[in-house]
Structures are given as C-alpha cells and as structure tokens.
Amino acid sequence: MKRTLSFILAGFVVVAMAADAAKISDLVKKPESFDKKTVKVTGTVDKFKAKTSKAGNDYYVFDLKEGKEKISVYGRGKLDKEPKDGDKVEIEGKFEKEHKINDDFSVKNQVTVGGKKGEAPKLKILSK
C-alpha cells in the first residue's frame, strides 16, 4: 500500500511540474492566463543578441515569433550553440505578462529560460 501511494504521489509531482504547452498567439491574446507559469513554446527566432551586462554577467535576448505575433525571450549565461535569426526553436521557461526591470523599464510578454545561475537553459534548436 505504501509503495502504491508513493508512486501515485510521485506521478502528481511530475504532472504539477510539467510545463504548459502554449502557442505564442495564446500568450499574447491571454497573457493573464499564463502569468508566472512555466510554458513550453515553439517559434522562429528574430533579433537574437548575446550581451554582457555592466556587472559582467552574460545574457541573451531575442523575439520568438509565430506569424505576426511575438514574445520576448531572456536567458542568463552563454549558450553552447546560439540560435540564428530564422531558426525554429522550442523554449521552456517562466512566462510573465510584464517583467519589470526597474522603475523606468519593463518588458511585456517575456519568457525567462535558464533562470537560475548555473542552470542549463531549456532552449532547443529544431531547424534552421
């Protein structure tokens, strides 16, 4: 009985941790439905930029497009293989309908991939 209960509880944990598959159009049209949730999204990379902050921290940003709709993607660190504009990718991360950077700047409809220091980003290049 204890063993069966353990397997059932483990199954609930896996389901609870699973990302919601979402379309970019859904995120843009109903951002409040996905706010602060982990999502998995597929789209086309646009305006990829790898940068280093004033504090010396590496990060990257790009738009992820589906037709005319787009969301912003932010990730910490350096990627082993950087996507190029036009690549189709799958990302997984925390969606925020508005990510406030400071009092003067915020980003709407952003997914943060690889949020913790040392965590590998969940970004997979599907095709070029």
Image (cartoon, grey):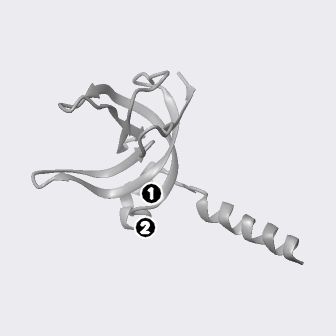
C-alpha separation, residue under disc 1 versus residue under disc 2: 9 Å
Where residue 29 sits: x, y (%)?
37, 60
Q: Residue 35: x percent and y percent?
A: 39, 63
Kind of residue sitting beneath label 2: Ser
The residue singled out by tag 1 in the image is 26
Please give the name of the residue rendered at 38% of the width and 31% of the height, measured from the top-left corner: 77
Q: Is residue 84 above or below residue 21?
A: above
Proximity of marks 1 and 2: CB atoms separated by less than 8 Å: yes
78 to the left or right of 99: right
| Residue at 49% across, 51% down | 23
Residue type marked 1: Asp
Give whichever of 18, 41 is nearer the camera: 18
Which type of secondary structure does the marked residue at label 1 adopt? Answer: helix
Question: Which mark is in front, 1 or 2?
Answer: 2
Q: Tell me which numbered mark, 1 or 2, is placed earlier along the sequence.
A: 1
> Residue drawn 86% across and 72% down?
4
Identity of the residue furthest to the bottom in this view: 1
Q: Which residue is mark 2?
A: 33
Looking at this view, name the residue that lies furthest to the left: 104
